[in-house]
Amino acid sequence: QIIADFRGLKNTTDDIPYSVSYILPADFGDGLIAFDLETTTPNVGGRFAPTCATPVGYSMSWMPEHGVYRSEDPAEIDSILQSYVVTKVAHNAKFEHTVLANHVINFVNFHDTKLAAYLLEYPSTHLKHLALQVLGHRMVTFEEMAKGRDPATIPIEEIGPYGAADSVMTLRLWNILKEQLQEKKLWPVYTDI
């Protein structure tokens, strides 16, 4: 497990300080967790096929300064992912929902920053673009991190900070996008459609 510290970093292209730990925290603060999967990248007909993807690890963030990446099966936290008490936020939650459902995990009680950004009419709803547009934060892209390698073969020291950054930026974005949805009276559209 990698625990990455994002305090004071302007970009995730900077070296991200991290430590290795094997303990998940017992307290998730206010019950909101950003969640992201890293998966294999199967192609069918020359296109990425999410329904064939297998998790190689996952990341979580419950504080905007720290993210955790674990190169483990997300089934180890199925009680969190299937909880109606703990609210999750993901970017493009349809992907997490699809992959987890294919691995018999019912991903429930979640919000989606991609959907929120779409309703708010941001020019791009991609996580890396939103981080720059909304937070002024340039993120490392998957291609820059993976360098053509299969995610299952990338050392945790490389994929860990990358994965943790996805969850940290998703949490930071959600805190802003949620407020914008409410200010623009779009919250009912977001929650009811």
Image (cartoon, rainbow, N blue to C red):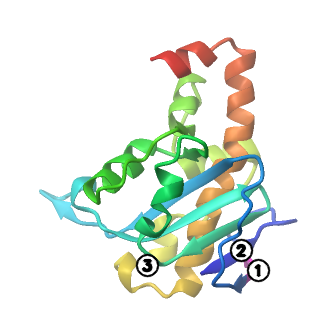
How many residues crowd mark 2 within 10 Å: few (<14), some (14–19), many (20+)? many
Q: Amino acid at mark 3?
A: Lys
Question: Which residue is labeled 2 in the image?
Answer: 4
Tell us which disc is closer to us: 2 or 3: 2
Queried whether the magenta region covers residue 97, the answer comes back as no
Q: Amino acid at mark 1?
A: Pro
Residue 29 in the image: state x and y as whole percent.
77, 53
Quarter holding residue 66: bottom right
Could you tell me what secondary structure mostly forms the magenta stretch? Answer: loop
Q: Which residue occupies the foreground of this view, 41 or 134? A: 41
Q: Position of residue 48 (x, y in %)?
A: 26, 57
Q: Residue at x 30, y 51 (%)?
A: 101
Residue 17 showing in the rendered view: yes
Pointer 2 and pointer 1: residues touching (CB < 8 Å)?
Answer: yes
Outermost residue toward the right?
A: 8
Q: Is residue 43 left or right of residue 123?
A: left
Identify the residue shown where x is 45% and y is 44%.
Answer: 93
Report the Cα–Cα distance between label 2 and label 3.
21 Å
Vertical order, 62 against 69 (above or below):
above
